[in-house]
Image: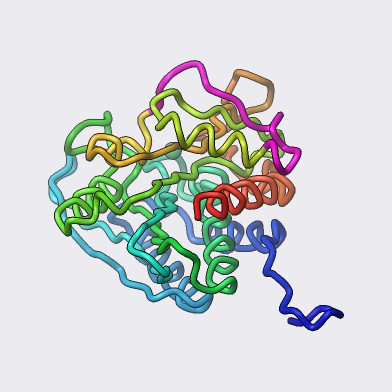
Amino acid sequence: MLCGCGKAESPVFDGAKAFAETEALAAIRPRDAGTGGARRAAVHLQAKLSAVGCKTTIDTFSEETPSGKMFFNNVLGRLPGKTKRLIVIGSHFDTKAGISPEFQGANDSGSSSGVLMELARVLAEKGPMETEFLVAFFDGEECRIEYGPTDGLHGSRRLAQQIVEAGGAAHVEAVIILDMIGDRNLNVTVPRNSTRELMKDLFFAAHQLGVRPAFSLGKGSILDDHVPFLLAGLPAIDVIDFDYGSAPGLNDYWHTPEDTMDKLSAESMQTIGNTILRMVENLQ
Ligand SMILES: [Zn+2]
């Protein structure tokens, strides 16, 4: 697109598009790891990711779990950079098992996946930056019984290990995990087990955009997809709003049939999208 001065217009993040992507994924339900829904979701995400201009792969792997050997599908997209420096932006796309046959997982894991897809579109349109981008949709984030070495965080553990084994750890500038960021009442509480520098980068980007009040430092740690990267020695941050319910502090929509699209807003997704985009631009 061209503006009046003849310069190409810079692509902008569109919260309405992120919302529509969320809706499309939430229609594939439920999508807990190992089910037909999860496989359909992976194929859906790969098609969308290819369409926005990423070079994509589906990384299928198996691991032992409390429910026996299970297969998982990570959906990965690459956007080349001018240097070897790498920024990973990730979201899980699986839903918690056993909630209900029609469980949407609109916020957990729809919203972060919708925002990530829209971020991929914008970053692809912008063209190569200094850093390469790896867009990662993780399978198997949710645990079956209780988080542990063989239960939950399967996709992120797999990618962290792959990056280290490929000798790429030193090139990783940031791993930014998005989770549950579509709540109408957006209140991101960054868990304390995130890399300090990246917290500062996030809060500064939010400050620059005038949305700093939507972000704060959480009271404690959270076990989420950023943890396998931290354990692998990579800088990682979890951008999560872990207060999702009918009143502050209740979190009563989380992992219940109440996690539906009507609880979300395009405005919240716009805030997250703009902030993450500014954060990664600042990291160039
Ligand atoms: Zn969850």
Q: Residue drawn 51% across and 46% down? A: 105
In terms of image quadrants, where is residue 259? top right
Find residue 245 and report its horizontal and vertical position in percent. 63, 28
Q: Locate residue 248 relative to residue 219 in the image: left or right.
A: right
Q: Is residue 138 magenta?
A: no
| Quadrant housing residue 197 | top left
Q: Magenta residues, as a range? A: 207-222
Between 188 and 205, the one nearer to me in the picture? 205
- Front residue of 49 and 55: 55
Considering depth in this image, is 224 or 160 the residue closer to the camera?
Answer: 160
Asked if residue 188 lies left or right of residue 7, the reply is left
Q: Is residue 103 positioned above or below 21 on the image?
A: above
Look at the picture and state if 120 lies above or below 234. Answer: below
Placement of 215 over or under 274, stated as above or below: above
Rendered location of residue 115, percent (x, y) = 57, 55
Above or below 17: residue 173: above
Total labels: the figure holds 0
Q: Is residue 220 magenta?
A: yes
Q: How is the image coloured?
A: rainbow
Q: Residue at x 46, y 26 (%)?
A: 191
Q: Position of residue 120 (x, y in %)?
A: 52, 65
Q: Ligand 1 falls in which quarter?
A: top left
The residue lying at 33 percent from left, 53 percent from top is 139
Which quadrant is home to the N terminus? bottom right
In the image, farthest residue toward the right: 4
Percent of width and height locating residue 38: 37, 59
Q: Residue placed at 39% from the left, 71% from the top?
A: 43
